[in-house]
Image: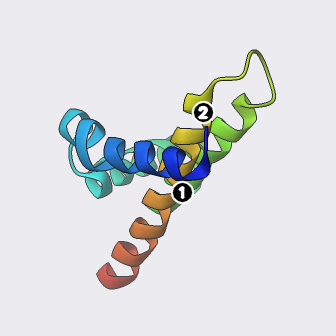
Amino acid sequence: MKAQETLKIASSLILGDRKEKHGDMFYSHDLIAKLWSAYLGKSIDAHDVACLMALLKIARTQSGETNLDDYIDAVGYMSIAGELVEIERVKR
């Protein structure tokens, strides 16, 4: 799969299917951050969640069969992380 196609698919998922399924990206990642923070006993934010999810997808590329969805999802999570860091900066 070419890089441009990976980006196009990731973008369509973030702006379409995933948004409809999971709702507002900041709200979702912020809620996950609160739950993970409670579990870890350490404060993390929505941006951290998106980066950690990208790392999970990257780790999956190292085991099992090649799954192009892992690459698409990693790109998607990093683009979300970039947007969330700006949202969090404005909220401070």
Q: Amino acid at mark 2?
A: Asp
In primary-sequence order, the first of circles 2 and 1 is 2
Residue at 81 percent across and 29 percent down: it is: 62
The local crowd at label 1, few if under 14, some if 14 to 19, many if 20 or more residues have their Cα within 10 Å, is some
Q: For the C terminus, which image quadrant?
A: bottom left
Q: Amino acid at mark 1?
A: Met
- The secondary element bearing badge 1 is classed as helix
Residue at 52 percent across and 40 percent down: it is: 73
Q: Is residue 61 above or below residue 79?
A: above
Total marks in image = 2
What residue is pinned by disc 2?
70
Q: Position of residue 26 (x, y in %)?
A: 31, 57
Q: Is residue 79 above or below residue 32?
A: below
Between 3 and 66, the one lying in front of the other is 3
Residue at 64 percent across and 24 percent down: it is: 67
Between 8 and 62, the one lying in front of the other is 8
Q: Position of residue 68 (x, y in %)?
A: 61, 30
- The secondary element bearing badge 2 is classed as helix
Relative to residue 64, is residue 87 drawn left or right?
Answer: left
What residue is pinned by disc 1?
78
Relative to residue 25, is residue 55 drawn left or right?
Answer: right
Between 69 and 92, the one lying in front of the other is 69
Q: Kindly report the distance in space between the C-alpha atoms of the residues bearing marks 2 and 1.
A: 12 Å
Q: Is residue 69 above or below residue 73?
A: above
Q: Position of residue 75 (x, y in %)?
A: 55, 50
Relative to residue 58, is residue 71 drawn left or right?
Answer: left
The local crowd at label 2, few if under 14, some if 14 to 19, many if 20 or more residues have their Cα within 10 Å, is some
Q: For the N terminus, which image quadrant?
A: top right
Q: Position of residue 61 (x, y in %)?
A: 74, 31
Between 27 and 37, the one lying in front of the other is 27
Q: Residue furthest top?
A: 64
